[in-house]
Image: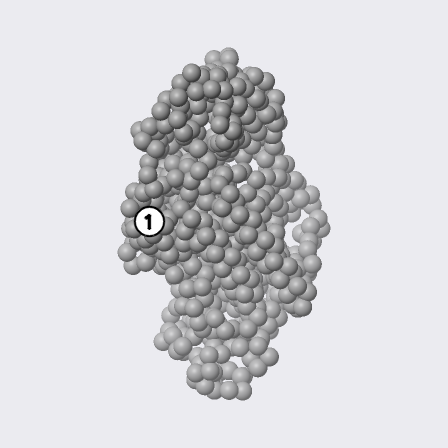
Amino acid sequence: MGVYKVTVATGTDIFSGTIDTISISLVGANAESGMKRLSEMWTPGVVSHVEVDTDLDLGELQAVRLYKETYLIPVQDAWYCRYVHVLSPDGKLHQFPVYQWISGQTSVLIPHGKGRTLCRGPDNICMEEWKEELEKSREVYKWKTLAPGAPHYIDAENVRDLPVNEQFSEREKSSSDFQKVLSGFKGTLKGLQRCADSWKSLDDIKTVFCLHRTDISDKVTREWDDDAFFGSQYLNGCNPMVIRRCQRLPDNFPVTSSMLAASSDIMEELENGNIFLADYKILQGIPANEPINGKKQYIAAPMCLLWKDPQDRLLPIAIQLGQSPGEQTPIFLPSDSKWDWTLAKIWVRNADFQVLETVYHLLHTHLFAEVFDIATHRQLPRNHPVYKLLIPHLRYTLQLNSSSRTLILDPEGPHNTVFGTVQTLLKKAMEEVTYRGLCLPDDIEDRGLKSVPNFYYRDDGRLIWEAVESFVSSMMRYYYESDESVRTDPELQAWAAEIYHKGFLSNESSGIPSSLETVSSLVKYLTMVIFRCSAQHAAVDYGQFDFYSWMPNAPSSMQRPPPTAKGVTTEQSILEALPDVNTTAMGLVCMWRSCNEFQGWRPLGSYPDVHFTEQTPQDYIHEFQEKLEEISKTINKRNQTRSFPYPYLDPKLIENSVAS
């Protein structure tokens, strides 16, 4: 009983306010107060102050209830609330993080900002209402099957059907629409997107760089055909996920020492750990893209053998453009003619592009992030510490994915030429997913790359992984006092189980946990989730314009089948095999858009929405941010001495989520 001083903050976006009536009541352990109307809620950024005077003994405050009554029935006028603060009569401050849109005529129960798990004692007065809130969320966040063998995704036909809190704000929508218009303009300025002819020469391809280029893209354009640069991309390019140390030569890749110009015997180099393999067998049997501009497209499943020379350069030494050796599948070597060897490397780069975009970019970051997002909203209440921890790293995932799905995965959509390729490759990739492959330290170890020199993705990524892991460990050990508290948290276990079933399709061989038994296992799992959504996405996405804008370094499709003999390739036949002018221009537009951050971009560790209100978790967040600052300085210092900089895992450049 007494007077409670209430502060309610509206969002700062231009459309955050509302003309509708907003009221509030306070929910305590003993009783709930009456409603109190708020004023001036139409003003963006307004902080409204009211007093709630009650004769009831509310007890300890557990929640606030926000009411929204429509002023004009036909008009949908959503309201964005940042937070509610309540100063109780005893002088104690209670914080209630909101950070969501509230639309329609409704009431929303907002829990206290303290992180709570059921294993630490439920707030009995609100238990049934928390369950009702989760049921409401499950009605909004429904699962849908994308394709047989692929992860489930949000049941929404388009972006407009998404939950309102998953959509860009009006300001961010405007920024995104502007980038789309500008990128289309850039591609059409010289009329390149209207030309379906093959390129006349490799030099002519430089004409697409008339409006945008970077220092790295310029260097790629100059060095793309150099063997040392070709090899370096397996460590520090867009796709550092394929290469592995070779213990023995595959039976279907019959390379012999007599073929190679290296001074050492191939078996001796294998023993010394200097031979590496990039095997694209996952592409075997994958259908090529549908015809583009009336021209049939082709795909290959090559194998590339690489050697670490005494100067620690990674050099390609043999390429086979298929999985079945024979007269029609020769092994191409650096000693072959210039154009034979160049075309063989181009085919490898095309395969690398296909695997990167569908497996390691689309599936391993975007689609898995979507699974994490949906399960989090369906199974975890807003005051659950795991919800609070993850929500900044899931921001706008559904918006980005739904937009991309409309373009790429819709068989009737504008990019339907790649639908069959993507759909089939996703299914095969899902069969090969492993938990260790999703955890950077385990993946590096399993691929035998712990000691390979000049591996910047590994070195920088390990710093990020360890920082995230330390942060997550501190946060979770604050809320989970024992392994038993993890095992007996029904909401956490339901969350992990749903991810396992809907995201990883109950594949036991993957090693993905369907339940979490210890605090340590929870820490590793959450580290994997956050790293996937932030740093891993940055590693496979941010360098695309730098490395792929020079089309011969990563052709998106091939217009001629792989060569079946040596000595017949010419520059002209390479130009005929590469994507035509139209396809090149469209690809450049996509790469240019990928390197532009949207207006609401937030760097890793930036949490302007204060979901954790207790002092100890806030201290841990501050320590995490300080650690990321140190890592940023370390990486920038390293890049000053690197012959080829690797900026993609600088924490200041990494987005919290895949929304970039």
Q: Is residue 599 visible?
A: yes
Farthest residue, direction front: 90
What residue is pinned by disc 1? 486
Does residue 501 appear to the left or right of 439 in the view shown? left
Name the one closer to the observer, 440 or 357. 440
Residue 522: horizontal and vertical position, in percent?
37, 52
Above or below for 644 versus 296: below
Residue 605: horizontal and vertical position, in percent?
55, 48
Q: What residue is drawn where x is 59% and y is 35%? A: 172
Helix, strand or loop under label 1: helix
Q: What residue is drawn where x is 44% and y is 17%? A: 54
- Counting other residues with Cα less than 10 Å from the Cα at mark 1, is it few (<14), some (14-19), or many (20 or more)? many
Does residue 497 appear to the left or right of 72 in the view shown? left
Name the one closer to the observer, 170 or 93. 93
Farthest residue, direction right: 210
**Toward which corner of the image does residue 322 lie, by quadrant?**
bottom left
Label total for image: 1
Q: What residue is drawn where x is 47% and y is 19%? A: 2
Residue 27: horizontal and vertical position, in percent?
40, 25
Q: Amino acid at mark 1?
A: Val
Q: Is residue 295 visible?
A: no
